[in-house]
Amino acid sequence: MARVFNFSAGPAVLPEPVLAQAAQEMLDWHGSGMSVMEMSHRGKEFIEIHATAEADLRELLAIPKNYKVLFLQGGAAAQFAMIPMNLLRGKSGADYVSTGQWSKKAISEAKKYCKPNVAASSEGDNFSRVPAQSEWKLDPDAAYVHITTNETIGGVEFHWTPDTGQVPLVADASSHIMSRPMDVGRYGLIYAGAQKNIGPAGLTIVVVRDDLVGHASDATPTVFDFKIQAENDSMYNTPPTYGIYIAGLVFQWLKALGGLSKMEEINVQKAKLLYDYLDATEFYGSPVAVQDRSRMNVPFTLKSDKLDKAFLEAAEARGLTQLKGHRSVGGMRASIYNAMPMAGVQALVAFMREFEREHG
């Protein structure tokens, strides 16, 4: 069976060269006589895989030397708790900017550990935009300021980096990390689940500034303590070894492509193709403010939701899968991550035009 164009929000499409290499190395990694899945995380083979993946990630994101890179588990959802556990540093509150469902989940979890101050929210606008920083009500004594830089469900993306002064900026970058360069030095901590742009589900990446490590609350489980994980090269417990291996292959693919600046150019072209069509027709609609549209997750609606079922069935028949919007918002959503080729977006737009001609 031919491969489909997979528009899933995550677990998501991976680069075909990465999958091909992983398949080739499945039974025997570089003459070791075993699969990466069978390796001891303490063995020299996996230590090499781990070290190379970290070095390539540091190069791609231009991570300063005074930042730790952690390969952890639990997804971004675990970080909703680990952030206040590790970063409160004796303070009682933290600022959160609410731009969608994932922001709300982070705030809800933080309530178990501190007093989250919702410094700004676009919920009154159905999470269709990023609040301008002039709207934010920041607490100068907050332990940190938390943002979700791309809302996977609502399709809202920060295309700018907030200025939070001396208060550390914390970002859940799960669904757009590696899609463009980031000025890591302007953040205290960046975290991301891997299953969008990095690799398979099960791996979580944390990039944290040195001065924010070593302040975990006494009640923090040892495995959740950034300091313990950093001191053990993310191997206090058995790490997600195969996820790290695949992430490393993705990093090598990105480097061969030309790095994150080149990746951004391609992502801009893909997003423009889809948004230009959405803007040119009244049959489909885009609910997100133009200046805040995500390049990774593109929600859209049809002129009547009575056509949704027919649209999805026809798309599936054309090999265009996973286009149904999240259950909380409905409609459609095309996730066009790094590994989605331009041909996939072209095929989607061509199908949408055809569907409009037939049902418009």
Image (cartoon, rainbow, N blue to C red):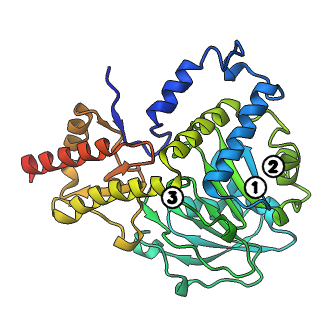
The mark nearer the N terminus, 2 or 3, is 3
SS at circle 3: loop
Residue under label 3, please give it: 180
The mark nearer the N terminus, 1 or 2, is 1
Residue under label 2, please give it: 224
Counting every numbered tag in the picture gives 3
Residue in the image at 62% along x and 85% along y: 137
| Contact flag, marks 3 and 1 (Cβ < 8 Å) | no
Q: Calculate the distance from the C-alpha at mark 1 to the C-alpha at mark 2.
A: 6 Å
Q: Amino acid at mark 3?
A: Arg
Q: For residue 152, say whether it is visible.
A: no
Quarter-of-image position of residue 276: bottom left
State the residue in front, 219 or 289. Answer: 289
Q: Residues within 10 Å of mark 3 (few under 14, many from 20)?
A: some
SS at circle 1: helix
Q: Residues within 10 Å of mark 2 (few under 14, many from 20)?
A: many
Residue under label 1, please give it: 82
| Contact flag, marks 1 and 2 (Cβ < 8 Å) | yes
Residue in the image at 80% along x and 59% along y: 85
| Image quadrant where one finds the C terminus | bottom left
